[in-house]
């Protein structure tokens, strides 16, 4: 083989590798966000997604059927464009659809959807999509503190809207990555954000620590919750930081 032929082959290989890299990058920058039913303000969430859009991410939105009846859709359409917003009942071939996205975000995970996912009651397109993504090892990110961003909500409504600690633990075991709203863009960008879990249970026992996923780094609990000595010992062994919610 002559030097000219070798050089020609090297150029072809380089061109193929560059094309593969471009295709991979495009695939990695495909993001899917699912909005369920919520009455909470979405402005902080949309600001995070605007940051991602500015960084080149292509974002597709799916609205659950209940979301279309409870959420103000105007800010969503204006942020992403109507062509990038789908209704869950319009989804077909969910398994193939999921493969197009490297990450799935649940930016305002509601109590009803969290409960269904935790109990594996995947009887809607949105819940099945998330379930299938977790089964496939896709990265699923959920915002854990969207309820705290609503200052005007009354105490009773806030309590009703909170996700059950048992459901949080179950979803964590399934592979859901919990972040705060202001960490959404960072989590999407590099995947290295601190994996934090919030619980509202009155007693943090060693059993609670044992049921946390292996990659959990911080457990946030509400006052006046009691943390048992065994729980503190177990958390220390696993390198989990215990933080009380101020």
Image (cartoon, rainbow, N blue to C red):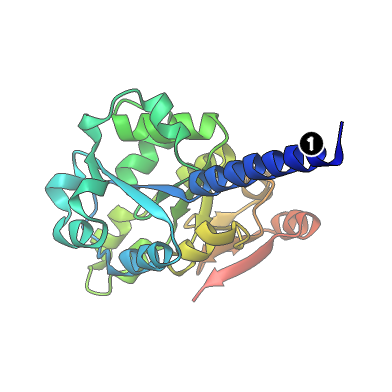
Report the side of 51 relative to 219 (left or right): left
Looking at this view, is 143 or 211 the one in front?
Answer: 143
Residue at screen point 79% across, 36% down: 5
Residue 56: image x %, image y %?
Answer: 44, 60
Residue 157: image x %, image y %?
Answer: 24, 60
Looking at this view, is 103 or 64 the one in front?
Answer: 103
Residue 176: image x %, image y %?
Answer: 52, 45
Q: Residues within 10 Å of mark 1 (few under 14, many from 20)?
A: few
Residue at screen point 76% across, 54% down: 238
Q: Which residue is mark 1?
A: 5
Q: Is residue 183 visible?
A: yes
Residue placed furthest toward the top:
93
Total residue callouts: 1
Location of the N terminus by quadrant is top right
Q: Is residue 225 visible?
A: no
> Which image quadrant for residue 240?
bottom right
Q: Is residue 168 above or below residue 76?
A: above
Looking at this view, is 196 or 75 the one in front?
Answer: 75
Looking at this view, is 16 or 203 the one in front?
Answer: 16
- Mark 1 element type: helix
């Amino acid at each position: 083989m002559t030097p000219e032929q070798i050089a020609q082959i090297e150029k072809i290989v380089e061109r193929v590798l560059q094309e593969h890299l471009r295709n991979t990058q495009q695939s990695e920058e495909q993001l899917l966000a699912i909005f369920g039913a919520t009455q909470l303000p979405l402005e902080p969430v949309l600001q995070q997604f605007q940051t991602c859009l500015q960084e080149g991410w292509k974002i597709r939105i799916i609205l659950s059927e209940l979301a279309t009846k409870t959420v103000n859709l105007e800010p969503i359409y204006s942020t992403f464009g109507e062509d990038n917003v789908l209704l869950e009942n319009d989804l077909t071939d969910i398994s193939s659809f999921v493969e197009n996205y490297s990450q799935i975000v649940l930016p305002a995970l509601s109590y009803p959807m969290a409960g269904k996912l935790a109990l594996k009651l995947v009887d809607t397109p949105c819940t099945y999509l998330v379930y299938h993504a977790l089964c496939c090892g896709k990265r699923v990110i959920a915002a854990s503190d969207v309820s705290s961003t609503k200052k005007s909500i009354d105490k009773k409504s806030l309590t009703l809207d909170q996700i059950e600690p048992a459901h949080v633990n179950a979803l964590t075991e399934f592979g859901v990555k919990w972040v705060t709203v202001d960490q959404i863009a960072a989590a999407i960008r590099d995947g290295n954000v601190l994996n934090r879990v919030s619980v509202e249970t009155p007693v943090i026992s060693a059993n609670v620590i044992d049921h946390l996923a292996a990659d959990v780094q911080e457990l946030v609990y509400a006052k006046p919750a009691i943390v048992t000595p065994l729980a503190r010992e177990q958390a220390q062994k696993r390198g989990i930081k215990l933080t009380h919610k101020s």
